[in-house]
Image: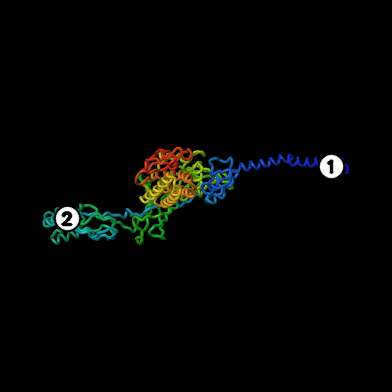
């Protein structure tokens, strides 16, 4: 091969290698750059969240700072949704046991539960009085509950007036032939004192006045009240005993204002008595009181029942189930009671505005109609086909509160507004006062909750992390031991709502890492407890509601204190005196 040919081959090979290298480095650059840029954008756009706490957002994977669960990618479909909505993954809904149901027309549960009490039939109650004045010498019936027969001796009365009347009778008897009118008048005077002809004849036959007179029972029955004692002086017509026939009884059921329209005369009632387990009684409502008690706001529905065997006793409490005939019509929208959260002034539900695969829950205020057993009639706020949360409603609401979104306690809060902004206004305008409905036992249990809370507050002031954890556990136990069974009606529902919220945040507090996480969680414990104490009051010394505008990232936070001295639990020694007293709760 010549030198010239070799040079040509070398030059040609160099060109081929150069073109190949150029294509590798420059020809595919656009696609590679596009691919790398897309991957970078995808990585940059991925947002990680917690399935249990959707308010958590992170640009990289990790663990939830609240519960410690692994973060999961946020679905891209979440972008652009309602900013007030709460998104929950399918896994989070299963874990929190959240269930939804579509709203539709239905009859609701026509069974209405009523509480009542057994009472004496007023038509069979009798007041036994004395017909002669005098002093009680003997009492033949000495205690209530004793059964008496008609004509049975009840008491013996010494009566000077009766002695005088008998002497007048004897004197008139002596001159009866000449003055028959006087004799008849003397006998009539004794008859007016309920002294029979036989007794008058015995007086005339003996020729002596009787100084003691026996009072006999006008009716038979059971003595329900004893009104005199041995030695008492009684006037004519004074009551001695209350006697009632207990073979027939009344059962009076309480009808609150919201249930009066559901009950009609003729409705059938089936009821049970706690002291007679396993036995059921039936009756028909034969009378509904047209008057409403101005104090208790309660009317009554009456059932008359035969009391064979004297099983029913006056004063027994009963629980009845009535099949109402005055209920709402079937075409009305109804929702389960478990779907509704209410504060007394507002009722709210959570509506799914997303899809089944990617639910998005938004709070919606509703206007409720009649209560139908386990359901409410919805007059405004929902449409046929709306999908609402029917189980786990409180969990969804708690997530909304934690995320600073509109919730039951903060209906108009913006996404950037603190969840505590309404506390001061709440204390002024809430109008809740359950202090008269709370039993002494409940007040003691609530006092224990407040006592442990105040200890937890002091531990946060002094930055004692380990002690804060132990006191959070004690606080959880105190909240659990505060029984809603001591309450009824709206007071019971109010406490159950606050109790669930407090227990949820004690769980958060038990998983907190570091004093700062304890302090952040203390914000929510304080808010709920302040509202609880303002509604039920507190035994003993009053407590103060303190406020620091710089806490909670300059959004402000409240807490309770037993003294007027400001000791800030959110900053401790760093800003111990930061805050002011905004309210005093007695």
Q: Nearer the viewer, residue 493 or 523?
A: 523
Label 2 belongs to which residue?
159
Q: Say what secondary structure mark 2 lies in.
A: loop
1 and 2 marks in contact (CB < 8 Å): no
- Disc 1 to disc 2, C-alpha distance: 157 Å
Instruction: Answer whether residue 563 is visible to the viewer in this image.
Output: yes
Indicate the colouring scheme: rainbow
Compared to residue 116, the image places residue 5 above or below, namely: above
Label 1 belongs to which residue?
9
Q: Nearer the viewer, residue 348 or 497?
A: 497
Residue that extends furthest to the right in the rendered view of this protein: 2
Crowding around mark 2 (Cα neighbors within 10 Å: few <14, some 14 to 19, many 20+) is: many
Q: Say what secondary structure mark 1 lies in.
A: helix
Residue 303's disc is none
Instruction: Count how many numbered circles sit on residues in the image.
Output: 2
Q: Nearer the viewer, mark 1 or mark 2?
A: 1
Q: Position of residue 136 (x, y in %)?
A: 20, 56
**Left or right of 264 in this view: 190:** left
Crowding around mark 1 (Cα neighbors within 10 Å: few <14, some 14 to 19, many 20+) is: few
Q: Quadrant of the N terminus?
A: top right
Q: Mark 1 or mark 2: which comes first in sequence?
A: 1
Name the residue rendered at 50%, 41% in the picture: 406
Name the residue rendered at 39%, 55% in the picture: 318
Instruction: Answer whether residue 380 is visible to the viewer in this image.
Output: no
**Left or right of 85 in this view: 234:** left
Q: Nearer the viewer, residue 334 or 418?
A: 418
């Amino acid at each position: 091969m010549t030198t010239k040919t070799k040079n040509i081959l070398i030059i040609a090979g160099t060109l081929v290698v150069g073109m190949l290298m150029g294509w590798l480095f420059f020809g595919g650059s656009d696609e590679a750059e596009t691919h790398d840029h897309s991957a970078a954008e995808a990585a940059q756009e991925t947002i990680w969240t917690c399935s249990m706490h959707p308010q958590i957002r992170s640009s990289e994977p990790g663990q939830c700072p609240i519960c410690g669960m692994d973060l999961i990618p946020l679905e891209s479909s979440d972008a652009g949704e309602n900013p007030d909505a709460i998104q929950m993954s399918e896994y989070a809904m299963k874990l929190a046991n959240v269930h939804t149901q579509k709203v539709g027309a239905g009859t609701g549960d026509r069974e209405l539960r009523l509480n009542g009490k057994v009472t004496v039939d007023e038509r069979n109650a009798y007041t036994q009085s004395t017909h002669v004045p005098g002093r009680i010498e003997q009492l033949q019936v000495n205690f209530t509950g004793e059964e008496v027969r008609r004509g049975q001796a009840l008491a013996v009365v010494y009566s000077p007036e009766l002695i005088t009347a008998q002497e007048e009778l004897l004197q008139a008897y002596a001159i009866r032939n000449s003055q028959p009118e006087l004799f008849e008048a003397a006998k009539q005077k004794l008859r007016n004192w309920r002294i029979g002809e036989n007794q008058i004849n015995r007086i005339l036959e003996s020729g002596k006045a009787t100084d003691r007179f026996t009072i006999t029972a006008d009716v038979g029955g059971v003595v329900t009240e004893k009104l005199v004692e041995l030695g008492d002086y009684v006037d004519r017509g004074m009551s001695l005993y209350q006697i009632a026939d207990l073979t027939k009884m009344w059962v009076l059921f309480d009808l609150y204002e919201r249930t009066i329209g559901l009950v009609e005369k003729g409705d059938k009632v089936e009821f049970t008595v706690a002291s007679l387990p396993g036995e059921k009684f039936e009756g028909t409502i034969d009378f509904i009181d047209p008057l409403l008690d101005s104090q208790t706001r309660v009317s009554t529905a009456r059932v008359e029942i035969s009391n064979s065997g004297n099983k029913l006793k006056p004063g027994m409490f009963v629980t009845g189930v009535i099949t109402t005939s005055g209920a709402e019509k079937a075409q009305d929208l109804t929702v389960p009671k478990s779907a509704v959260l209410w504060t007394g002034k507002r009722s709210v539900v959570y509506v799914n505005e997303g899809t089944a695969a990617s639910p998005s829950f938004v709070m919606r205020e509703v206007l409720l109609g009649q209560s139908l057993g386990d359901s409410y009639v919805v007059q405004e706020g929902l449409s046929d086909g709306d999908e609402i949360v029917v189980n786990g409603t409180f969990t969804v609401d708690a997530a909304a509160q934690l995320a600073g979104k509109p919730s039951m306690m903060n209906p108009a809060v913006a996404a950037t507004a603190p969840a505590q902004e309404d506390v001061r206004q709440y204390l002024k305008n809430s109008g809740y006062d359950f202090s008269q409905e709370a039993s002494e036992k409940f007040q003691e249990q609530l006092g224990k909750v407040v006592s442990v809370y105040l200890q937890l507050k002091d531990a946060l002031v002094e930055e004692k992390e380990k002690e804060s954890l132990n006191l959070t556990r004690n606080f959880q136990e105190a909240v659990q031991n505060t029984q809603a069974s001591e309450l009824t009606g709206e007071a019971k529902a109010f406490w159950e709502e606050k109790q669930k919220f407090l227990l949820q945040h004690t769980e958060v507090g038990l998983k907190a890492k570091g004093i700062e996480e304890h302090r952040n969680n203390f914000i929510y414990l304080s808010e709920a407890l302040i509202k609880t104490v303002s509604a039920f009051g507190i035994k003993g010394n009053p407590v103060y509601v303190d406020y620091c505008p710089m806490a909670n990232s300059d959004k402000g936070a409240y807490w309770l204190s037993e003294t007027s001295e400001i000791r800030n639990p959110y900053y401790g020694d760093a800003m111990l005196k930061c805050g002011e007293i905004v309210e005093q709760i007695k």
